[in-house]
């Protein structure tokens, strides 16, 4: 009479052991996957050391302009890319007179915290105008946030990404490299689209070549300069309020770079 219950318990123990082993293996595979990410190049890391206008706060890096502003851009990095890789790009954007807030995502993947912008906005009540931006998967998650919280952002800026969700194309700036055909194939709208001739997918950041990405015909510096110029024009055309001289900087930057 005791053999059957013992046999049943043994089966449950074996099943539990197998399940535990599977969970351990899956956990190991997950951490192995997320630990293999693109590191920021030295040129990007050097930006952090250049002046006092860049500060770290919890999971954020904040790039402040040299004069007061009430407008900020929240930036979501691309999947499996070290956040610091985008510092050269954001350093140029802040020179337009806009505060840039770089979000360091869990496991370097914005999909794990698509609503991070909500906490960011709450932390900076002095900001009156918010834009959300992102590269690649970061752009998709930024687009999702904008779609879910249209009353919290003034506009959406996408790099190597397209609108994901239901957000107005007229309030969106979409920038992509001409060698990034997979993005172009998914753009089914016509407003505010900038194609950078010779640009690729990776060079919005400074993290080196990306698997599956075509080599760019222009430098990362040139691709980012054209990106900043496009953002300057977009912010200007959005009829943003005066930012203590930022409007003139927008126009000057737009003139300096041919899109």
Image: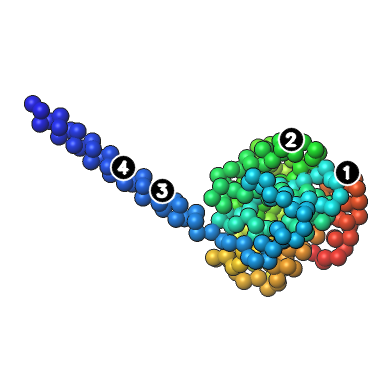
Q: Circle 2: is it few (<14), some (14-19), or many (20+) Cα within 10 Å?
A: few
- As helix, strand or loop, the secondary structure at mark 1 comes to loop
Residue at the disc numbered 4:
19
Mark 3 = which residue? 27
Q: Residue at x 62, y 62 (%)?
A: 40
What residue would you read off at disc 1?
241
Residues at circles 1 and 4 in contact by the CB criterion of under 8 Å: no
Q: Residue at x 47, y 55 (%)?
A: 33
Crowding near pointer 4: few (<14 within 10 Å), some, many (20+)? Answer: few
Sequence-wise, the earlier of marks 3 and 2 is: 3
Mark closer to the chain start, 1 or 4: 4
Q: Earlier in the sequence, mark 4 or mark 3?
A: 4
Disc 3 on helix, strand or loop? Answer: helix
Can residue 78 be spotted in the picture? yes
Mark toward the viewer: 2 or 4: 4
Q: Which residue lies furthest to the bottom in this view?
A: 217
Percent coordinates x, y for residue 123 in the rendering: 71, 38
Placement of 121 over or under 42, stated as above or below: above
CA gap between label 3 and label 2 equals: 38 Å
- Measured in 3D between alpha carbons, the distance from the residue under mark 4 to the one under mark 3, in whole angstroms, is 12 Å
Can you tell which mark lies on residue 151? 2
Figure quadrant of the N terminus:
top left
Horizontal side, residue 255 vs residue 88: left or right: right
Mark nearer the N terminus (1 vs 3): 3
In the rendered structure, find residue 111 and report the number of the disc placed on it: none
Q: In which quarter of the image is residue 112?
A: top right
The reply to whether the C-beta atoms of the residues labelled 4 and 3 are less than 8 Å apart is no
Give whichever of discs 2 and 4 has the lower sequence position. Answer: 4
Give the number of the mark in front: 2 or 1.
1
Image x and y of residue 227, in percent: 75, 60
Query: For the residues carrying marks 1 and 3, which lies nearer the camera in this image?
Result: 3
Color scheme of the displayed model: rainbow
């Amino acid at each position: 009479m005791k053999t059957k219950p013992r046999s049943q318990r043994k089966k449950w123990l074996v099943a539990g052991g197998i399940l535990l082993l599977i969970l351990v293996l899956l956990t190991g595979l997950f951490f192995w996957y997320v630990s293999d990410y693109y590191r920021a190049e030295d040129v990007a890391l050097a930006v952090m050391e250049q002046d006092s206008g860049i500060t770290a706060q919890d999971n954020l890096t904040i790039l402040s302009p040299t004069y007061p502003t009430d407008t900020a851009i929240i930036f979501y990095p691309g999947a499996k890319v070290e956040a610091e890789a985008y510092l050269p790009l954001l350093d140029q954007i802040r020179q337009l007179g806009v505060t840039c807030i770089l979000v360091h995502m869990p496991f370097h993947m914005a999909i794990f915290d698509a609503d991070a912008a909500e906490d960011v906005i709450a932390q900076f009540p002095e900001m009156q105008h918010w834009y959300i931006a992102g590269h690649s998967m970061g752009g998709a998650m930024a687009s999702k946030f904008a779609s879910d919280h249209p009353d919290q952002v003034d506009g959406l800026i996408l790099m190597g990404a397209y609108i994901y969700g239901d957000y107005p194309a007229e309030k969106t700036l979409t920038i992509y490299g001409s060698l990034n055909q997979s993005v172009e194939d998914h753009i089914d709208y016509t407003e505010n689209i900038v194609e950078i001739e010779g640009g690729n997918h990776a060079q919005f950041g400074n993290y080196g070549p990306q698997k599956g990405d075509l080599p760019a015909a222009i430098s990362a510096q040139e691709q980012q300069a054209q990106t900043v110029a496009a953002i300057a024009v977009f912010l200007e055309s959005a009829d943003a309020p005066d930012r203590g001289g930022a409007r003139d900087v927008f126009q000057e930057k737009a003139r300096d770079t041919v899109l």
